[in-house]
Amino acid sequence: MQVDARTKEVDSFVDKIARKPGKYQNPLIDITDLSGVRVILYYSSDVERVDSLIEREFAVDDANSWKRTPTSDPDRFGYRSDHYVVSCSPSRAQLSEWSPYRGLKAEIQVRTVLQHAWAAIDHRLNYKRASEIPAELKRQLFRISALLEVADDQFESVRQGAARLSSTYKESVSSGHLNLPIDRDSIEVYVDSSPRMQQWGAAAVGAGFNMEPPNFEPSDDSEGVAELTLASQLAGFADLNELDRFLDQANDWGEQALLALRPAGVSNEWYMTPTFIIASLIYIGSNLSREELERSSGHGFYVDGVLAARAAIGR
């Protein structure tokens, strides 16, 4: 999500009043864009949630607002974002900290990244209405607008499909069925659900790894999940069953391998997650060459540690 905000400069405010003499009897009340906020989101469902938040928290000037709905004019030119003119709601206006803004209006635009891309390019083209467009360009611009709308719908569909797939994976793993193909979603579910993660996290602490995230570390482990997915694929695991069997067999040599890995290339200050620890075990226990390891990890000192750990356990 990206949120941009701006407040009209005094010179711009005065110029707007001067351009239309007599229109603004009370400029501070009549001019609706004294301040503006633009909210840019990834998915159309996020737009709907932000719309609901705005409509709940502010008094919306419906006459000067526009919101795309399933019944919106299909021939309306351009891929329009939702546009609100708002003021403080009656309950909020009674609060002392909001009372100075009582009666003032502001604009809020809510759009997806694709709507934002259309708006940025459309602004450069300077066509405000369909009637202004040369006939030879009109069809092409309408097609682009339609394609962007279809793309937004498809991204939303993919998001919903990913959520359904993740739910199916969770049900399968929680039931002990690990015959799921190796991909980002299945690995993420395995990481969240498998006791192997806690087991090898504890083993890593015993080997001297730092498992406490620093303050600046993001709350998610997306990089670790990606690394574990890649390691499992490079090792040739067909499904989560094979990954789980590998980690079960690693009980015979894994702790010794971790002890050999850390002094070779990892300081106590280097934060490691259980996902990176398990990826390391896969690299240690696999038949990948040094060149393959370097291509996958990108860190020469880490590869040295993996190879040293292999030597220590005789693999």
Image: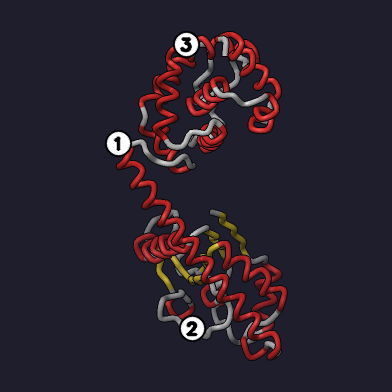
Residue marked by disc 2: 74
Which quarter of the picture shows residue 243? top left
Residue 273 locus on image (x, y percent): 51, 26
Badge 1: how crowded within 10 Å, few (<14), some, or many (20+)?
Answer: few
Q: Residue visible at 54% across and 30% down?
A: 235
Q: Is residue 23 above or below residue 176?
A: below
Which kind of residue does numbered mark 2 sit on? Pro
Which disc, if any, is residue 44? none
The mark that comes first in sequence, 1 or 3, is: 1
Residue 277 locus on image (x, y percent): 52, 23
Q: In 3D space, how far apart are the residues under numbered discs 2 and 3 (Cα atoms)?
A: 64 Å
The mark that comes first in sequence, 1 or 2, is: 2
Q: Residue visible at 67% across and 82% down?
A: 127
Q: Residue visible at 57% across and 20% down?
A: 284
Residue marked by disc 1: 174
Q: Is residue 93 visible?
A: no
Residue marked by disc 3: 206
- Please state which of residues 238 and 124 is positioned toward the viewer in this rendering: 238
Say left or right for 209 vs 134. Answer: left
The mark that comes first in sequence, 2 or 3, is: 2
Give the number of the mark in front: 2 or 3: 3
Which kind of residue does numbered mark 3 sit on? Gly
Q: Residue visible at 44% across and 12% down?
A: 252
Badge 3: how crowded within 10 Å, few (<14), some, or many (20+)?
Answer: few
